[in-house]
Each structure stands twice: as structure tokens, then as C-alpha cells.
Image (cartoon, rainbow, N blue to C red):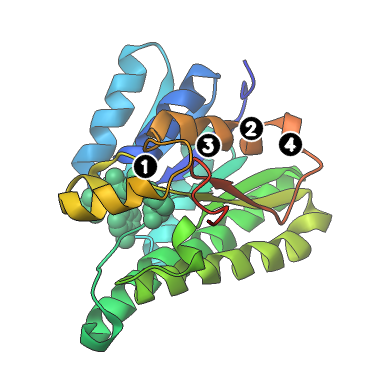
Amino acid sequence: MRLREKVALVTGGGSGIGAAVCRRFAREGAFVVVADVDRAAAERVASEIKERGGRALSLGVDVRDRAEVEEMVKRVEEECGGLHILINNAGITRDNLAVRMTEGDWDLVVEVNLKGTFLCSQAAFRPMRRQRYGKIVNTASVAVRGNLGQANYSASKAGIIGLTRTLALEFARAGICVNCIAPGFIETPMTAGLPEKVKEEALRRIPLGRFGKPEEVAELHLFLASPESDYITGQVFFIDGGASIGI
Ligand code: NAP
């Protein structure tokens, strides 16, 4: 068991990639905290883990809200006895061409994706520093290379890469590694509703010829959350079937 005695907090853990990470980490012995703005979804994932003999706690949180984030970390420390792994996975899209994008949709996406990652990392720093051990895994996207209709999303995800590299520098002395994954097209509720034409175009650009599965992304999370990656920090890992290679 690669995560025995570890407490792992997964934001956006109620759905898609986050839920797959929660299930995978639980199988490796972690005490998993499933945190999501959709409290019922978080509870479903936590219950499933517990029914299978794992340890889990569900919490409702909006990662944009500093007070809620601080309360979440406090509860994790009190109820789980520490915090070793933070998976900043909560994220949203509000796609539109830049000329038509509303200020509200710009702000919302940047706040959830980028500010949420900052607030959760900042709150997790204290318990991790006390333990002199921590693993933070942030979530960017292949969209950092630019994607039609995703000015807000692409900018927020590119910001997460800069944030990752800076936090890696600032947190290193405290024994905390900070890395980032950048998924391509993964089959989750986030991508399920995309028009068929968009999906066909996306598929055409993937050298491996298929979309990714949340469980495949969770394996990369596991590596970056486990001691096997102790000498890796400040890095970005694309997991996209080769989509980011280019033509
Ligand atoms: P998903 O299935 O939509 O899951 C995201 C979860 O985050 C949902 O449960 C969502 O709740 C929750 N969430 C939204 N806003 C939140 C907030 N303010 N505070 C806390 N939780 C919040 O998405 P996914 O596809 O698994 O994506 C997970 C991460 O991977 C995201 O950061 C996404 O940008 C990134 N990513 C995904 C893909 C892909 O192809 N799927 C590609 C690249 C990157 P609601 O459902 O209530 O909104």
C-alpha cells in the first residue's frame, strides 16, 4: 500500500477525475477526504469507499471561499489527524468565443480554477510544514496551449502552471513537493455534454486515437502523491494521448 498512514484531500472529488483519484488513493490505504461544492456527490463517493472497507470523509466546500477552505483544512486536521496530500482538482468551464465572453464567466472560471488552487494550497501549507512533508498536485489542461472558445479556461490553467512553479520554490524547504498534471480529453461529466462535432475534432488530434479515462489520470496522481516521486517538484505532466505533441 503506497499511501498507508497518509491523509489525502481531493477537491472536486465528487465527480470525474477527482472521484477516480479518491477511489484509487483509498485502495492504497489513504484516509481520503472527498471535498466538493456538490456535497451529495462527495458523500456518494465517500460512502462507496467506506462500503469497500476504506477510510473516507466527505466535506462540502466552495474552493473560491477562503473561510470555507480554511474551515475545511481545520476539520481535516481535527478529524483525520493531519494532511499529507492535496489534490487541487476542482475546475469548471464556461466556454464562449472571447468576443462574446461575459465578464461574469471570465471571473467565475478564473476564481474556481486559479484562485481556488491558490487558496487550498495556502491553507494546506501550515499542516504540511508542521509534518515536514507534503504533496500538492494541481490540475492544468492541454488547453494551456490555446483552445478556441476557452480564453477564460486556458488562461486560468496557464496561471496554474506559473502558480505551481512558484509554490514549488517557496514550499521546497518545508519538505513539500508541488507538481501539476495537464490532462487532454478525458471522459467525464465535464466533457460528456460537448457537441459530437467538437468531440470528433478533438479525437482527430489525439495520436493514440482515443479519449482518456479518469482512472488513467488517477494513476499519474498516485505517482505524484507517493514517495516514488519525492525528488520531483515544480513540473508539469501532460496526460493526453499525445495531443500536445503537435502535428
Ligand atoms: P467534473 O466531472 O465536472 O468534476 C469537477 C468537480 O468539481 C464537480 O463535482 C464540480 O461540482 C466540482 N466543483 C466545481 N466548482 C467547484 C468549487 N467552486 N468548489 C469545489 N468543487 C467544485 O470535471 P473533470 O472532468 O473530472 O475535471 C477535473 C479537473 O480536471 C478540472 O480541473 C478540469 O479542468 C481538469 N481537466 C479535465 C479534462 C477533461 O477532459 N475532463 C481535461 C483537462 C483538464 P459541480 O458538478 O457541482 O460543478
Task: Determine which quarter of the picture holds residue 62.
Answer: bottom left
| Front-most of residues 10 and 123 | 10
Farthest residue, direction front: 247
Residue highlighted by disc 1: 186
| As drawn, 242 above or below 29 | below
Amino acid marked by disc 1: Ile
Whether the residues at callouts 3 and 4 have beta carbons within 8 Å, the answer is no
Position of the N terminus by quadrant:
top right
Q: Residue at x 62, y 70 (%)?
A: 162
Identify residue type, mark 3.
Ala
Give above or below for 140 relative to 65.
Answer: above
Query: Residues at badges 2 and 4 in contact (C-beta under 8 Å)?
Result: yes
Q: Which mark is residue 8?
A: 3
- The residue beneath circle 2 is 223
**SS at mark 4 in the image:** helix
* Closer mark to the observer between disc 3 and disc 4: 4
How far separated are the C-alphas under marks 3 and 2?
13 Å
